[in-house]
Amino acid sequence: MKRSITERTTLWVMTFILLIVIEAGLFGNGNVIFFFFGAIAMYFGLQRRSKWLVITGGAFIVIALLSLWSLRLLIFGILLYLVVRLWKGTPAEEIMRPLKETTRETQNGIWKDRLFSSQSTPFTSYEWQDVHVQGIVGDFYIDVTDTVLPKRTSFISIRQSFGRVKIELPYDLPVRIHCSALFGECRLFDLTPKRLLNESIHMKDGYDRSIGTEAELIISLSVRFGDVEVIRK
């Protein structure tokens, strides 16, 4: 799956913070204070929808980044690494392969806890198994329309630090959803997407009738930085 806006923003912010720590600790660059002023200005600008605060914060951050020796060393190190690999005869395609391998089909419907991995349900019909998985970085894609749920309560529980979670459900399936995020966007069915900032959302759908012994699904999603999407198709 493509990286979401939230995920890309989070990765950039973490990279900048790491550079700031390196700069302040090793080089004693006092200009790093501009970064913190800029970050605070952008935060309040986004909260209050103030264009000028966002522009001012962005200007402070640019000033800080242009003065970072650690950023220059990072770029130099990356270029040196690429030159060495190419000098040793490593094909360019092999060097870039890790950037292309983003999604992995989960074999036989078995989900595994992995620190860095993107997983998805098989791309054909498969036998349902309850999902209980956690990770640090990666995306999860679950298509419930390609399987048959048993006539009981089924569960999807995902705990992820950085990444995107997308779940597709059939129209007639009763579902209860609990979604929480430290920073991210939550889209549930046809409702307007909601930006979450250390918030939780609870929702149930399809219980306007007595379900009896019909199948139902309980979804519990928790992400630190990332987007969540649950739709019907």
Image: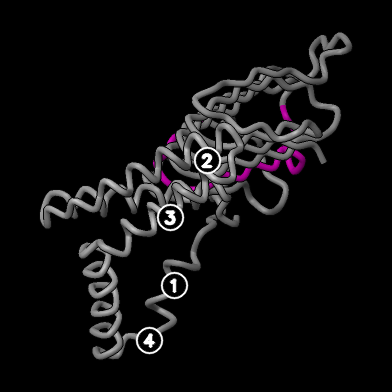
Secondary element type, mark 3: helix
Residue 59 - label:
3
Instruction: Tell me which residue sits at (72%, 25%) in the image.
Output: 150
Q: Amino acid at mark 4?
A: Pro
Which dot, 1 or 3, sits closer to the camera? 3
Instruction: Tell me which residue sits at (26%, 63%) in the image.
Output: 67
The answer, for residue 133, to whether it is visible in the render is no
Q: CA distance from mark 4 to mark 2?
A: 33 Å
User: Disc 4 or 1, which lies upstream in sequence?
Assistant: 4
- Residue 73: name its quadrant: bottom left
Circles 1, 3 touching at the beta carbon (< 8 Å): no
11 or 146, nearer to the observer: 11
Q: Which residue is mark 2?
A: 226
Q: Which region shows up in magenta?
A: 132-149
Q: CA distance from mark 4 to mark 1?
A: 10 Å
Q: CA distance from mark 2 to mark 3?
A: 26 Å
Locate residue 145, reporting x and y percent: 77, 40
Q: Which residue is mark 1?
A: 97
Circles 4, 1 touching at the beta carbon (< 8 Å): no
Q: Which residue is mark 4?
A: 91
Q: Amino acid at mark 3?
A: Ala
User: Disc 1 or 3, which lies upstream in sequence?
Assistant: 3
Q: CA distance from mark 4 to mark 3?
A: 40 Å
Residue 5 - label:
none
Circles 1, 2 touching at the beta carbon (< 8 Å): no
Q: Is residue 141 magenta?
A: yes
The answer, for residue 8, to whether it is visible in the render is yes
User: Disc 2 or 3, which lies upstream in sequence?
Assistant: 3
| Quadrant holding the C terminus | top right
Secondary element type, mark 2: loop
Circles 2, 3 touching at the beta carbon (< 8 Å): no
